[in-house]
Image: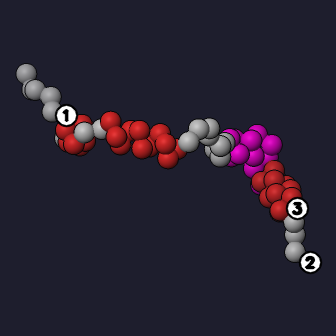
Amino acid sequence: MAMTLEQIRQAGLEALRKRLGRAGTIRFLQQFQTGGGDYAAGRRAWVDRTTRADLRAAATPKRTKKK
């Protein structure tokens, strides 16, 4: 019989807890918190306001003068 999504989630959490312990499981899960907002809209806004000169300046390594 196939496992439900809830059963898979519970089995996964139990496997993490057994292998990593409680603190390790929490630290692992904290890496995967979902963000908020609309990524596509934010990306589009960034692209619309970024010029080629901005990209060129960001790609050019910063050089420091030797004294």
Q: Which residue is mark 1?
A: 62
**Residue 47 sits in quarter:** top left
Q: Residue 9: where, in percent of width, then height?
A: 82, 57
Query: Is 4 above or below relative to 49?
Result: below
- Look at the magenta stretch and give its main secondary structure: helix
Q: What's the residue at 49%, 42% (across, down)?
A: 41
* Dot in front, 1 or 2: 2
Quadrant for the N terminus, please: bottom right
Element carrying mark 1: loop
Q: Disc 1 vs disc 2: Cβ atoms closer than 8 Å?
A: no
Report which residue position mark 3 lands on: 7
Helix, strand, or loop for circle 3? helix
The alpha-carbon separation of the residues under discs 1 and 3 comes to: 53 Å
Q: Residue at x 81, y 53 (%)?
A: 13
- Residue at the limit of the structure toward the bottom, as seen here: 1
Front-most of 29 and 66? Answer: 29
> Can you identify the residue that label 2 sits on?
1
Amino acid type of the residue that numbered disc 1 sits on in the rendered structure: Lys
Question: Of 65 and 2, which appears nearest the observer?
Answer: 2
Magenta residue check for 27 = yes
Where does residue 56 sit, x and y in percent of width and height? 20, 42
**Of callouts 2 and 3, which one flags the residue occurring earlier in the amino acid sequence?**
2
**Disc 2 crowd, CA 10 A, few/some/many (<14, 14-19, 20+):** few
Task: State the residue in front, 4 or 11.
Answer: 4
The answer to whether residue 57 is above or below residue 7 is above
Q: Which residues are magenta?
A: 19-30
Tell me whether circle 2 and circle 3 mark residues in contact (CB < 8 Å): no
Say whether residue 41 is left or right of residue 48: right
Mark 2 to mark 3: distance in Å? 12 Å
Q: Position of residue 4 (x, y in %)?
A: 87, 66
